[in-house]
Amino acid sequence: MRRIAVITGTRADYGLLYWLIHDLHHAEDIELQLIVTGMHLMTEFGHTVDVIERDGFPVAARVDLQLSSDSPQAVARAMGVGMIGFADALSRLAPDMVVILGDRFEMLAAASAAFTLRIPIAHIHGGEVTEGALDEGFRHAITKLSAVHFTAAETYRERVIQMGEQPDRVFNVGAPGLDHLRRTPLLNREDLEAALDFRLGALNFLVTFHPATLDIEDAVSQCRQMLAALDALPTAHIVFTLPNADPGGRAIIPELEAYVARHPDRCRLYASLGQLRYLSLMRQVQVVIGNSSSGIIEAPTFGAATVNIGDRQKGRLRARSVIDCAPECLSIEHAISRALEPAFQSLLPTMENPYGAGDASGRMLAVLRSVNLVELGRKPFFDLPDSASRVS
């Protein structure tokens, strides 16, 4: 029985990991060890560990980061607290491998603990670029600590290899979030409205705005610019979700709360929608607005246009359904207008998503089940052919 620990820290990464967690849990030759941390354990962000347990997945360990605020100092301290907690949990559980997704600070803490304990790490979504966020550095650091890599596109696989990782340990499996398209029965409009306790309109937006963590001092002003742009569409029904527990995130929340309070008939704010309501809503809205990675990776497959604001996602591959704009009112207004043009909307069903076909979880499971654990104990650096001669 191979013991595989999966670490989840936010509603977002849990949604992406859901089907892999499901398949590991139901595999007869694998013992799933689910470690829950971060926002899942915080009441203000919905205490979403309850959702995980309602989904039927047993939680093997909880690592509380003691994140008292979202200041850079508090986040750095939480990483230290998290590393202690992950060291204790992983030492107790003794997994054969650890699965980590993405690029957040708590995942770097987890990877550091696992690497030091000599537990091989399988990393999902490496090789990507997000120039406007601290996630950029966290992601690449986790790549260098990891022994197996599951990338979401061939370009990203090549970049991980460029970073010195062995090609036979880097697998382009596509984005796991797209597995929901094939495997998750989504809610129809009527059932979604009942689940949300909110009526949709003729025009609907889904809005998620996070601070760009390299420019946290501008987070509030950028959020206000976005809200001012939304005022230009007074008939739109808008569903907002809270930002992540990133530096600067808490300062945005009062802005969103005040906006929703001014428009209670057509706006709602949710701490967490969960993947079923979130993806079902993505199917119903005309435009996904903000700077979340879901607007880049999942929205094109679920048939929504995306207005991507600012530099937080700068560098990621994009489908043609994604419209980039500056974090300024007029630029956002123009981008939304373009996304709503009938000609643009009519093309959405035919747009190709560069992040795969929705079969990532099965492909990852096959690797996790068969990879030689003994050989993962060492990480020889792989030099690209044109650089090997210069190194030697």
Image (cartoon, grey):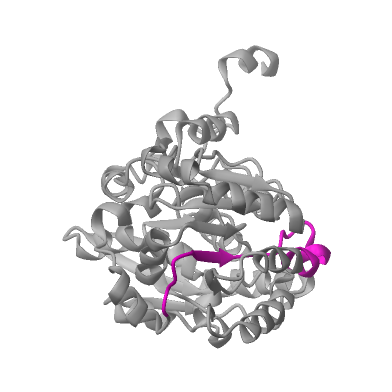
Which residue corresponds to the image point at 32% horizontal and 52% vertical from the top-left?
A: 179
Q: Which residues are magenta?
A: 199-223
Specify the quadrant of the image occupied by residue 190: bottom left
Residue displayed at 35% across by 46% down: 373
Q: Can you tell which quarter of the image residue 87 is in?
A: bottom right
Establish if 154 lies above or below 391.
below
Question: From the image, which quarter does the N terminus lie in?
Answer: bottom left
Image location of residue 384, percent across then percent down: 57, 20
Whether 218 is among the magenta residues is yes
Residue 124 visible in rendering? no
Task: Decide if residue 71 is on the left or right side of residue 9.
Answer: right
363 to the left or right of 145: left
Residue at the farthest left position: 28
Report x, y in % for residue 277: 38, 71
Relative to 297, does residue 196 appear above or below in the rendering?
Answer: below
Rendered-image quadrant of the C terminus: top right
- Residue lying at the far right in this picture: please name it: 217
Question: Can you give x and y, in whole percent of width and height, for residue 382 in the image?
Answer: 55, 27
Residue toward you, 343 or 94: 343
* 360 relative to 307 in the view: left or right: left
Q: Name the foreground residue: 256 vs 129.
A: 256
In magenta segment, residue 49:
no
- Depth check: give the residue in front, 72 or 331: 331
Front in this rendered view, residue 69 or 280: 280
Q: Is residue 345 visible?
A: yes
